[in-house]
Amino acid sequence: MTKPAEAEISEVPATSTLARAIRRFAQTDGDHNTVIPALTLHRRSAPSEPLHCIYNLGLGVVAQGDKQVLLGGEAIDYGPGQSMLTTIDLPVVSHVTRASVREPFLGMMLTLDVRAIVQIASEMDVPRSRRNDVYGSISFKALDAALLDALIRLVTLLDEPALVPRLAPLVQQEITIRLLTGPHGPQLRRLVTAGSPSQQIAKAVAWLKQNFVQALDGDELADRAHMSPSTFRQHFRALTGVSPLQYQKQLRLQEARQLMLNENLDAGGAAVNVGYESASQFSREYSRLFGAPPQRDITRMRLAPAAAADRRRTVATSTTRGMGPRRASRANASQRA
């Protein structure tokens, strides 16, 4: 079932200013890194195919065009005038649904620093979340004018690279403050509330990303989160949209796809590298997630160079960000599109 993002809103006129700023620095299709490490800009001149990826802690904004995100069987459409906040790493399927050469999709992604959020939240008098409340780990909200203005200033600061080291951290701090005190505030504050279910699940997710090759022991993960197994599974699914086992499976399969695509491993080698003992089970689960057996899927991706480039960037970023030294060296990519 498809539904619009949370707020039914008309397009915010000022997003056209943000679109012009993004277009200035993203003049070709693709994902563009910037001199501000946390900021990436994204452009597409046509709707894109659904792409499996993992969304990290960050703020996504569409300035022009439309996008759809599929999480746990629910499809959410969002576009200009709306923002998307993710507070823990989430396996999703996303794609651009409205874009053309004349009016390309234009968006931006700002990665957030959890340590900065904790520090700023501790220094502010913000409403406290109730300890036992469970919040989703992704939220879509209307862009308020003040937050939009800060985002525009951050992007236009790219015109003055000499000033970026001194001014960008200040604007990023302002954006974090506005997120904590704005519509996304409850989600973000919940992430940093000591001992909250959201924080415990975030720690479990981080552990899974570091150790997904290992056999999964659900009871051990629950112990790490100081929860009973049933409570842990309930909170984990509420926040990620999938069970711990499904989450691990997606991490494994996306890493295997990256190994085959970028490092030319065959299916058997990739399966072993990500923790599978059965090649047939790997092939079945790979086909179920990506729609084709491993060899056919990789061949299809290599025959579509532009699409493959997007997939390589996203898959590498998805599974290697935050991993240990052995795998982190593989992540040579920009943030998600």
Image (tube, helix red, strand yellow):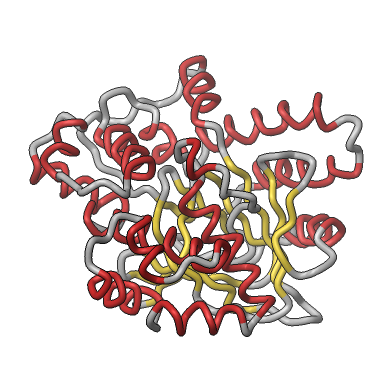
Q: Is residue 175 above or below residue 55?
A: above
Judged left or right of residue 172, residue 6 is left
* The image quarter in which residue 263 lies: bottom right
Can you say which quadrant of the picture contains the C terminus?
bottom right
Q: In the rendering, at what x and y percent does residue 221 appear?
A: 19, 38
Residue at coordinates 39% horizontally, 26% vertically from top-left?
A: 127
Q: Is residue 322 above or below residue 109?
A: above
The residue at the far top in this view is 123
Q: In the rendering, at what x and y percent does residue 140 appear?
A: 47, 56
* The image quarter in which residue 187 lies: top left
Residue at coordinates 9% horizontally, 42% vertically from top-left?
A: 229
Judged left or right of residue 57, residue 12 is right
Can you say which quadrant of the picture contains the N terminus?
bottom left
* The image quarter in which residue 135 lies: top left
Judged left or right of residue 10, residue 64 is right
Q: In the rendering, at what x and y percent does residue 152 appear?
A: 76, 47
Q: In the rendering, at what x and y percent does residue 276 appear?
A: 27, 60
Q: Is residue 196 above or below residue 322?
A: above
Front in this rendered view, residue 192 or 302: 302
Q: Is residue 258 above or below residue 125?
A: below
